[in-house]
Image: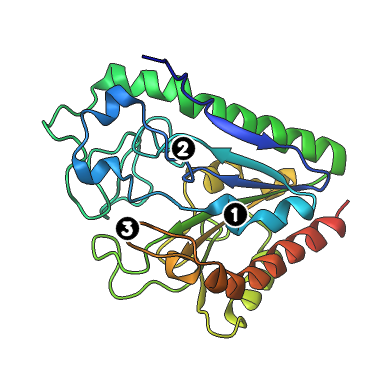
Amino acid sequence: MTYTAPPPPFTFHQGTQPLLVSMPHAGTYVPPALAARFTDEARHVPDTDWHMERLYAFAKDMGASILVATHSRYVVDLNRPPDGASLYPGQSVTGLCPVDTFDDTPIYAQGDVPDDAEVAARRDAVWAPYHAQLRAELDRIRAQHGVALLWDAHSIRSVLPRFFEGKLPDLNLGTADGASCDPALAQELLAIAQSAPGYTGVLNGRFKGGHITRHYGQPAQNIHAVQLEMTQCSYMQEALPFDYLPDVAAGVQPHLKRLLTAALAFAAART
């Protein structure tokens, strides 16, 4: 029997521009011992933000830094506060170490959900290194350019009754109700999203930005953070086998590039 070491908590590419693209839910790795405790459904990690690196491949060519999670959000959710506090009080949410899927079905087959010690161990092993890298890169970018832009890239199934009614808009921009980035930038991004033919866009609707956007976005300190939660039907199959659809993705990618280009232009005017 051969032993395969687990991957590091993230992969990272350092760019040349004042933009960091974070992909905290793109990981699919689950340690074998943990996967053995999962239901068959959970082993497929259906709530992954699939194919983010491929969808945003152009961002590297634009000079962006790219930070990508390797571990599944079922191991630990990198976009939740370290204490597990709810980001949307009063609404249905999943936790720091989720125990149920987006379809509200159990992740753990025998109900042996992680205790506080296990949650802390996962947070230390995966969550903390990701956030340390994120913090370090934002600080480096700001020191070099005078301003840093954080783009938190996400995707989700377009219909999820647990979290919202009907079909989600395609391009869901979140700025923590205006607290995480300059309002002028937010409005420019919204205009781009809403003018994209064949797609719908909204600002601070159902998704206002998770922990990453809310925690790191500090406009007064020249760090501007935006989350984009986009519908998976805009670029991939929303059900197994969750395939990337290049022809479909090619429709939305130019609009994603326009959004990042606008963010970089905003930064250039402040460097």
Relative image position of residue 173 (x, y in whole percent) = 54, 64
Q: Nearer the viewer, residue 74 or 133?
A: 74
Q: Residue at x 31, y 40 (%)?
A: 95
Q: Residue at x 46, y 23 (%)?
A: 6
The alpha-carbon separation of the residues under discs 3 and 1 comes to: 18 Å
- Viewer-nearest of discs 1 and 2: 1
Give the left or right position of residue 256, taking residue 204 as reference.
right
Give the left or right position of residue 29, taking residue 60 as reference.
left
Q: Mark 3 belongs to which amino acid? A: Leu
Relative image position of residue 185 (x, y in whole percent) = 70, 65
Please tell me the numbered disc located at residue 78: 2
Q: Earlier in the sequence, mark 2 or mark 3?
A: 2
The answer to whether one can see residue 163 in this image is yes
The alpha-carbon separation of the residues under discs 2 and 3 comes to: 24 Å
Q: Earlier in the sequence, mark 1 or mark 2?
A: 1
Q: Which residue is mark 1?
A: 54
Q: Residue at x 20, y 42 (%)?
A: 40
Please tell me the numbered disc located at residue 240: 3
- Secondary structure under tag 1 reads helix
- Secondary structure under tag 3 reads loop
- Viewer-nearest of discs 2 and 3: 3
Q: Mark 2 belongs to which amino acid? A: Leu
